Amino acid sequence: MEKLFYIGTYTEGTKSRGIYSAMINENGEVDGMATETNRTVVNPSYMAVNGDRLYAVEECDAGSLVTFGIGDDGALTEIGRTNLPGSGYCHVTAYPDGKFVSASAYVSSGVSVCPVNFSGVAGDPVAGTAYEGKGKDKERQEAPHTHSSQVTPNGKWLLVSDLGLDKIFIYESAPAGKDLKEHAVIEVEAGSGPRHFCFNEEGTKLYVLCELSNRIFAYDFNAEKGSAELIGSYSTLPEGFAGENTAADIHLSSNGNFLYASNRGYDSIAVFQVLDDGKLQPADICKLDIKGPRSFAIVDIYMIIAGQVSNNVVVYRLNQENGKLRDRISYISVPSPVCICVKQ
């Protein structure tokens, strides 16, 4: 088993030159150095891979979505670029059928849905939405701040999380004219700040990670009706912790038995066992020897973690029996890494 993965970074005010790549082998080992694969992008803070195409958003004052072709050696070649309305794009996701790409704007709020042509290049947005309002936190929720979007495994719904409004919007995934057709809204506890979320493989469970409250909200999700029912709420931090922390990323293990969430501040990975009914059982909070674990990805029995503040990427082995992080396998230096994206 060898897997190619890409590392998105912040380039402004850092030593980074764009997107980097590396290879992880069956033993969890990564080459001692990441390779610069493209210098044409500014602040490629989030990426998504679909086949031999990689999509990256530039987190800048002027929003843009860049399409790259992936070469046989993993090198990236820019083959398309489209301007997006608004600014501060921080997330991108490819539809499962490959027909559209959805990009989320943190600063200006909202999502832009772009069609993908026969060459795999994302074009100008054909639909989107923007939000108004504010939340409970006067500093972080003074306005809408859309943080991510994702299509349900069955391809029927597009979910959009807004940190500033404490809401998860559910839309019909297929664009309807210039607007997305709103179907329902999940109201998250005030002041929570929903950031990222994930589904189980069947699309029947939804787990929402909240950046401000450092909590995970678990839902039963009806994939046909597009409705959600809260079944649990869980802290990502140890009891009694009173320091500064913002939760960042969330993923299920390869076998679906464990759920992981990253903490920035109390630099760690929170581990939960997924019970038969989809509820969570806290299993561990593993302290890391990196700072600012903003993004991570799971490849088989390994977890690749980006340390934004410590300027490195590390690989840990996962215990398949209890889900806990075991020994650290690999370490590479990368300036300001903020996104790990694996080519499947």
Image (cartoon, rainbow, N blue to C red):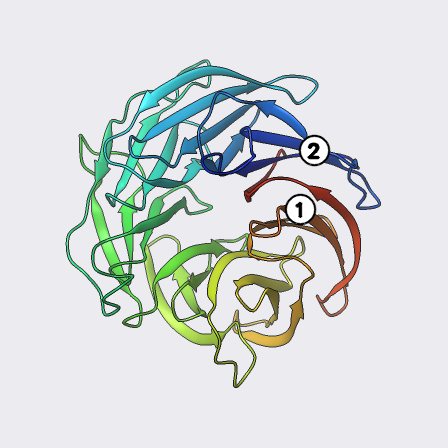
Q: Nearer the viewer, residue 91 or 96?
A: 91
SS at circle 1? strand
Task: Choose top left, top right, bottom left or bottom right for residue 193.
Answer: bottom left
Q: Image quadrant for the N terminus?
A: top right
Furthest residue in direction bottom, as rendered: 240
Q: Is residue 165 left or right of residue 90?
A: left
Residue at the (29%, 61%) spot, across then down: 140
Residue at the (47%, 28%) spot, across then down: 55
SS at circle 2? loop
Residue at the (53%, 32%) spot, across then down: 49
Q: Nearer the viewer, residue 148 or 40?
A: 40
Q: Amino acid at mark 1?
A: Val
Task: Choose top left, top right, bottom left or bottom right for residue 91.
Answer: top left
Q: Nearer the viewer, residue 52 or 334?
A: 334
Q: Position of residue 236 (x, y in %)?
A: 52, 71
Q: Amino acid at mark 2?
A: Ala
Q: Position of residue 241 (x, y in %)?
A: 52, 81
Question: Residue tagged by mark 2?
Answer: 34
Q: Is residue 38 left or right of residue 23?
A: left
Question: Residue tagged by mark 1?
Answer: 313
